[in-house]
Amino acid sequence: MLIDSFERRVNYLRVSVTERCNFRCQYCMPEKPFSWVPQEDVLTFEEMFTFIKLSIDHGVDKIRLTGGEPLLRADLDKFIKMICDYAPNIDLAMTTNAYLLKGHAQKLKDAGLKRINVSIDSLIPEVAHKIASKNVLKNVLEGVNEALSVGLKVKVNMVPMKGINDNEIIPILEYCRDRKMSIRFIEYMENAHAVIDIKGMKSSELLEVIKSKYSFKDLGLEDSSPSHYYELDDGYKFGIIEPYEDDFCKSCNRIRMTAEGDLIPCLYFDEAMSIKDSIKRDDINGALSVLKEVVKQKPEKNRWSEDDGESSKRAFYETGG
Ligand code: SAM
Ligand code: SF4
């Protein structure tokens, strides 16, 4: 079992399978060129799988594939099948922008994937275009429909931003509720790679907007989930991810791996240790000591709530959000 220095059990591995993306979201990587990490620096799926097996053997029972955009990577379904065949009870999910989901959802489901999170920041084509720097909405919504029709469970992530999509909080909540998908609003996390003048909405501001139409009760933080949950009178639950709140990190159970094999103890900080050399040499003990050290190095808290004006330098497209 992996336990960090603050007695938190680490059982959740988030794997960024690529840092490439077909979108250029304003809050994530507005200006990156399409391809910047040489392909030979990226771990193969076999190499990632070697590390995933090691993590599972040491207590990881929850894995999320993310990126960049995971659907850009060829043979993702084969990778999913490798993981599910090794650990049939693993809680395996994927976060995607859904642009390439149409035509692939069934293949992913057949490989063993059960759940996906899809990022939808707007239901207005021009606004979605502005946020992603590309005309994306039609493909995304078709992808979501296909995922639902093949029986994948879908959760939606939205990052509300003032003056951009803050008038769509209720429409997106209703879009999700009508399709029995849960929604999580993610507070914009300041970072050095985003467009400079983005103003995110804090949870209290989001709740004010929702309160203008619905009443709800506060369900509190869910065990080891970063979401604070609320329930509308009709029983529909929505979540808010509040990294600026003091207790956000209290039950953090995760570490992250980049496509190049860096293990990251915390989304906020730059610190990382590489498992790449050990994995390439098939040195499982070496990879295990890096894993244990990274777990040990998990900090108690992120610094988003510190008021010293510093932004995180960590790129979300590398760490997988
Ligand atoms: N490309 C996929 C997608 O967009 O869903 C997966 C990777 S993306 C980095 C994972 C999640 O991080 C998305 O839901 C995205 O909205 C969120 N994200 C990225 N940058 C963010 C930021 N600065 N603040 C809050 N959420 C962010
Ligand atoms: Fe790509 Fe996801 Fe980042 Fe948007 S949030 S640029 S879709 S990785």
Image (spheres, rainbow, N blue to C red):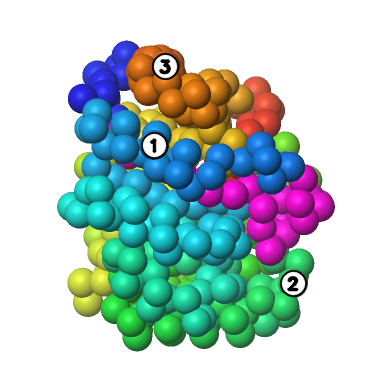
Q: Which residues are magenta?
A: 11-36
Q: Is residue 15 a member of the stretch shown in magenta?
A: yes
Q: Is residue 1 left or right of residue 76?
A: left
For the question of whether residue 100 can be seen, the reply is yes
Mark 1 or mark 2, which is nearer the start of the sequence?
A: 1
Q: Residue at x 39, y 34 (%)?
A: 51
Q: Secondary structure at mark 2?
A: loop
Q: How far apart are the two marked residues, 3 and 2, measured between alpha carbons?
A: 43 Å
Q: Is residue 243 above or below residue 264?
A: below
- Between discs 1 and 3, the one toward the N terminus: 1
- Give the residue number, with chain letter if any, for mark 2: 134
Q: Amino acid at mark 1?
A: Thr
Task: Please state which amino acid type lies under the numbered disc 2.
Answer: Lys
Mark 2 or mark 1, which is nearer to you? Answer: 1
Circle 1 sits on which residue?
A: 50
Q: Residue 74: x and y, percent? A: 56, 62
**Disc 1 on helix, strand or loop?**
helix
Disc 3: which residue: 286
Q: Tag 1: Cα neighbours inside 10 Å, few (<14), some, or many (≥20)?
A: some
Q: Residues within 10 Å of mark 2 (few under 14, many from 20)?
A: some
Q: Mark 3: give few (<14), some (14-19) or many (20+) Cα within 10 Å.
A: some
Is 293 situated left or right of 34 in this image? Answer: left
Quadrant in the picture for residue 2: top left
Q: Residue 298's spot in the image, x, y percent?
A: 41, 21
The amino acid on which the numbered mark 3 sits, given as a three-letter code, is Gly
Quadrant including the N terminus: top left
